Image (spheres, rainbow, N blue to C red):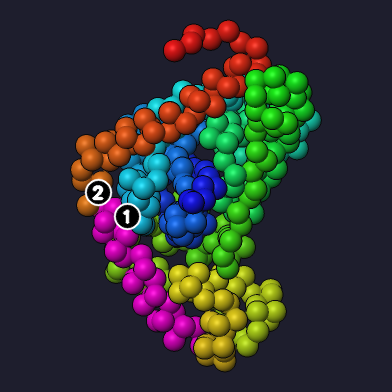
Amino acid sequence: MSVLKKRVFSGVQPTGNLHLGNYLGAVSRFVALQEQFDCIYCVVDMHAITVAQEPEALTRQIREVTAAFIASGVDPKAHVVFNQSQVSEHAELAWICNCIARIGWMNRMTQFKEKAGKDRENVSLGLYAYPALMAADILVYRADAVPVGEDQKQHVELTRDIAQKFNNDYAESIARHGFGETFFPLPEPLIQGTSTRVMSLRDGTKKMSKSDPSDYSRINLKDDADAIAQKIRKAKTDPEPLPETVEELAGRPEAENLVGIFATLAGQTREDVLRTFAGGQFSAFKTALVDVAVEKLAPIGAEMQRLSADPGYIDSVLADGSRRARAIARETMNAVKDIVGFVRERA
């Protein structure tokens, strides 16, 4: 008797060049989860437009993220890969999530505060409300788990709050329509690996970012072997040799960042890395890191370049994934509409 796999949902915004932080924090985890879960991976283009986007660039970036998924090892036939805007049920459920969520919950969302800055009166309503859309993204597939970094954990907690309140508010209707005591599962955050936050190669106190004006602050997934090697060799370090213990990395952000990157790319722990390189200078460590990074990342960049040259293929992957995603999402939305009390057309 086969056992049904639990379902995972996650998404990546198409907002510029994907870099090492995106790969280690999200895309590589997507690949690792494929054996254990039924996976639904989304290019969240509706989230992208919470801030202004140039339309042609957005189209290119949606395809680029899709190419990164496939080049990294996500199987779009065994799992679902699609872009959010092709499945209208995301927006439908987002409105219901807006009506379930409380203003106080939204006001506590730290990422809105960070992105809006001091000029909150002039940001879009979408930027304020996007955590409800993120909740809808997860709940429309009734996902059991969401792979996230530490900075996204709060959004999964909000999703759980919305799901729990929906289950409580509509408990009688849920039971009356044959769904038992609850309708939405409470998704769990999956936080795995040794390096959940990848920092800038130029400043170990800042997160690696596609918006940093210095291209040497990040390794882009499309970088070739020469670019990867040059950026690692130029990465900022300190004058001290590598320590023997992880605790001794405290207060040395650049050293901690490079050790974390090495560990994650090599599939080791930080302790393993330090046992090998303790007492050594960064010049030798960087040479070894170049070898690991080029071996792991250069083939992904080359495959991304190949896939990006065939937008018709990328679009066919997204169309197929969207059809499959829509079938799951429509079933959820039909049930939600019945539970809420909407009148809908019956097949």
Task: Judge by depth and name the residue closer to the eye, 277 or 77.
Answer: 77
Which one is nearer the viewer's eye here, 318 or 300? 318
Position of residue 118 measured from the top left corner of the image (x, y, whole percent): 68, 36
Label 2: which residue? 307
- For the residue pair 201 and 311, the one nearer the viewer reads as 311
Residue 277 x, y percent position in the rendering: 52, 88
Q: Amino acid at mark 1?
A: Ala
Give percent across and percent down for residue 23.
45, 57
Is residue 94 among the parts visible in the rendering? Answer: yes
At x 31%, y 65%, the residue is 298
Query: The residue tagged with tag 1: helix, strand or loop?
Result: helix
Q: Residue 223 bears which disc, if any? A: none
How would you classify the magenta stretch by its main secondary structure? helix
Distance between the Cα atoms at labels 2 and 1?
8 Å
| Left or right placement of residue 294 versus residue 309 in this view | right
- Locate residue 314 relative to residue 101 in the image: left or right: left
> Marks 1 and 2: in contact by CB < 8 Å?
yes
Q: Earlier in the sequence, mark 2 or mark 1?
A: 1
Image quarter for residue 92? top right
Pointer 2 local density, CA inside 10 Å: few below 14, some 14–19, many at least 20: many
Q: Counting other residues with Cα less than 10 Å from the Cα at mark 1, is it few (<14), some (14-19), or many (20 or more)? A: many
Q: Which residues are magenta?
A: 281-305
Please tell me which residue is depicted at 70% across the width and 79% down the height of the picture: 247
The residue at the far front in this view is 1
Q: Amino acid at mark 2?
A: Leu
Q: Is residue 347 left or right of residue 95?
A: left
Residue 60, compared with residue 25, is above or below; it is above
Residue 138: in magenta span? no
Q: Is residue 304 magenta?
A: yes
Q: Which residue is mark 1?
A: 71
**Element carrying mark 2:** helix
